[in-house]
Image: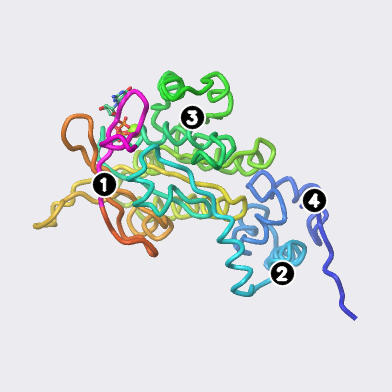
Amino acid sequence: MIIMPKKYENVADLPGVGEKTGDKLKKAGFINMMTLAAASPKELMDVASLGEGTADKVIEAARKSEDVIGFKTATEVLIKRESIGRVSTGSEDLDKLLGGGIESQSITEVFGAFGSAKTQLAHQLSVNAQLPVEEGGLGGNVLYVDSENSFRPERIKQIAESRGLDSEEILKNILVGRAYNSDHQMVLVKQAGEMIKEKNIKLLIVDSITGQFRTDYSGRGELATRQQKLNKHVKALQNLSEVYNLVVFVTNQVMSNPGLLFGDPTTAIGGHVLHHATKTRIYLRRSKAGTRICRLVDSPHLPDGECLVRITEKGIEDLEKKK
Ligand code: GTP
Ligand code: MG
């Protein structure tokens, strides 16, 4: 006889949870079975004061309920990978470099000096994500976490209108959360989890991911704490990208690395923590008037390479117009 695993809809109904603990879990971002299935017992123990045994049981029940117990066949993995969405950057050359655009189910990081157009690219993607899939979009809406107060609706309007799109509609479908400090930024991402399905969100932007962490933990002795927090934050983003087939796009600043004698002496902030969590990394540099060099770095499945793009009123474009 095959025993079917019990299906749970509400977090509070899970064994050993109940309303009060259920609320604590939800507040911490564990809003459904999928997010719990991807959690570690320690996380649940921390946020909802569960005992280790209960935390283990909750995770197991959530995994069974969602049918994500353990191993999958390669065919199932392939099916999941085939559902990966890609959003166009506005430049065919850059899309090609990225294997067809910026992918869902993982985090993409763009890093570069100030003025290198990281925020411009984020604005462009906020418009493009709303296009139908056939036109390089994701057919969905956008959550934009702005930690540097650099989101500009006027720029969205300009990009949309110069591409013949209804700017009012485009603006309405971008939900902006201003992050005032690193803890607030983490809370916003937790809230995001609750909105993704309801609001048909397909793209989540964090511009920038490291800025607030760098300010809040600037002392030498605080580096370990900063990295720990940042690790939690990027893990939460990674989970969202996988659970909801979401494109997660984050920007990052650079610092100069004076220890490096040869080559480009700039490195992305965030160290190994960020480096390991982001699957695709794009390095942006200023070039001749209005152009930027985009370099794909250490991609696990694409060759390294570079291309040039232009920044115009339309947003990001190819250097030369394609026929
Ligand atoms: P930081 O956030 O300061 O680290 O920089 P960033 O990499 O986010 O730079 P951002 O995307 O803000 O790029 C700013 C640059 O984009 C400006 O220096 C301009 O060259 C260009 N830019 C911004 N808006 C427009 C525009 O409306 N038209 C054109 N043609 N270029 C623009
Ligand atoms: Mg910026």
Rendered position, 85 above or below 71: above
Disc 1, SS: strand
Mark 1 or 2: in front is 1
Q: Which residue is mark 1?
A: 307
Q: CA distance from mark 4 to mark 3?
A: 30 Å
Where's residue 249, x and y in %?
45, 44
Residue farthest along the left direction in this orientation: 261
Q: Give above or below for 303 relative to 140.
A: below
Tally of numbered tags? 4
Most common SS among magenta residues: strand
Which residue sits at x=67%, y=61%? 37
Tell me: 302 left or right of 245. Answer: left
Circles 4 and 2: CB atoms closer than 8 Å: no
Callout 2: SS: helix
Q: Residues within 10 Å of mark 1 (few under 14, many from 20)?
A: some
Q: Foreground residue, 242 or 273?
A: 242
Asked whether residue 113 is drawn in magenta, I would say no
- The answer to whether residue 195 is above or below residue 55 is above
Residue 115 occupies which quadrant of the picture? Answer: top left
Are there few (<14), some (14-19), or many (20+) residues within 10 Å of tag 4? few
Residue under label 3: 178
